[in-house]
Image: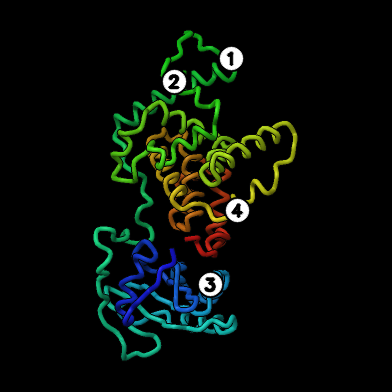
Amino acid sequence: MTTIIKARDAADFLSLVPRLLGYEPRRSVVLIPFSAGRTGGGLRVDLPHAAADTDAVASTLIGFACRVEHTDAYAVLVYDDADAVTHAELVAALEVRAQACGLRRIDALHISSGRWRSYLDPALGGTIAGDPDAGTNRPAADQGAGASLPHVDFARSERVGRALTECARALEWVLNGSRPADARIHPDALVASLALEDLPAFFESWIPSHGAVPPPGDGTDAEHVDVQDLALLIWCLARPALRDIALATWVRGVDGGDAALTAQQEWEAGVAYPDELGAWMMGEGPRPDVDRLTGALEVCRLAAASAPAAYRPGILAASAWLSWALGRSTHAARYCEQALAIDAEHGLSLIVLSMVDAGHLPDWAFRAQPG
């Protein structure tokens, strides 16, 4: 839903920004695009580390703002740790580019240690009021908070690891007819493997609305998930073809997963993979449902936290892509870096990290969300 900011002054407006963004920015420049006095979000990048980077940051932010539908004005907020007003040259560079694009500046504010000052009038400043409507739903501490994987205790991880071994043995027999030398297949693993008869339905069953995984929490969610089912999911997400079918399902529903599965099978038979089916991986196409992506991300974070290290890169890459698709590029980069620390050549992790480094965002991030 579009957020209508009704702020009596700069202090009231700034008290609403963390709820608007979903976090408290730190060492950041935030551009809030407006259309007819309304805004639906903000665009954040790290503050430039050197004066030479100022023009590039300004160009990136105004370029983003111009892609947001119907933008006609903007406010710029600089969050810094310095008590003195800093980065005035960045604010000026933003205004030069905004004027060239026909965007009107509403305000330009410097924020540090709970206080604000105006770039436009040095006499203006004060303390930022608390958001009276935030209640217990206060945003995470900063843009990096919330990227840590949930805690899974060692005993639980051990059970998942054993289940994963049994799952791999069962699937080797089911898929390749290769029965283990000791002829033993764990019955629970064999039953779990039957879910692969309908891959999109299996991946769809993990969306929280289906009751498989509770909402994100402090890691206790792991106790509510069947170990064999989680092992099977980890096994799938560690394989690029199956991981991509999972992502297609979570983005486009069971029908999208079916289409991706068919395309994958045809590609293996020598048929070109349809461009339109892969376009969403680059952020093109209709805006995915945010709740579905958020639920899928929590599932992947739980799977990554529960999996042995050798299985983690693919799951972390899926977490990175889902974070990027949700506009959480800072989180996406962290998951990519964790994956690449295990496998320096991991394909999807390198792709997502390159998109983040290039400042590439999904096209749907610039379109208004229905509702």
Which amino acid is tagged 1?
Gly
Of label 4 and label 3, which has the lower sequence position? 3
165 to 177, vertically: above or below: below
Q: Mark 3 and mark 2 in contact (Cβ < 8 Å)? A: no
In percent of width and height, residue 195 lies at: 50, 26
Q: Which residue is mark 4?
A: 282
305 to 283, vertically: above or below: above
Q: Which residue is mark 1?
A: 177
Which amino acid is tagged 4?
Met
Q: CA distance from mark 1 to mark 3?
A: 56 Å
Q: Secondary structure at mark 2?
A: helix
Q: Residues within 10 Å of mark 4 (few under 14, many from 20)?
A: some
Which amino acid is tagged 3?
Ala
**How did the renderer colour the structure?**
rainbow
In screen coordinates, is 338 left or right of 253? Answer: left
Q: Mark 1 and mark 4 in contact (Cβ < 8 Å)? A: no
Q: Residues within 10 Å of mark 2 (few under 14, many from 20)?
A: many
37 to 203, vertically: above or below: below
Of label 2 and label 3, which has the lower sequence position? 3
Which amino acid is tagged 2?
Ala
Of label 1 and label 3, which has the lower sequence position? 3
- Which mark identifies residue 313? none
In screen coordinates, is 121 left or right of 359? Answer: left
Q: Which residue is mark 2?
A: 189
Q: Which residue is mark 3?
A: 65
Q: CA distance from mark 4 to mark 3?
A: 19 Å
Whether residue 329 is visible to the viewer of this picture, yes or no, is no
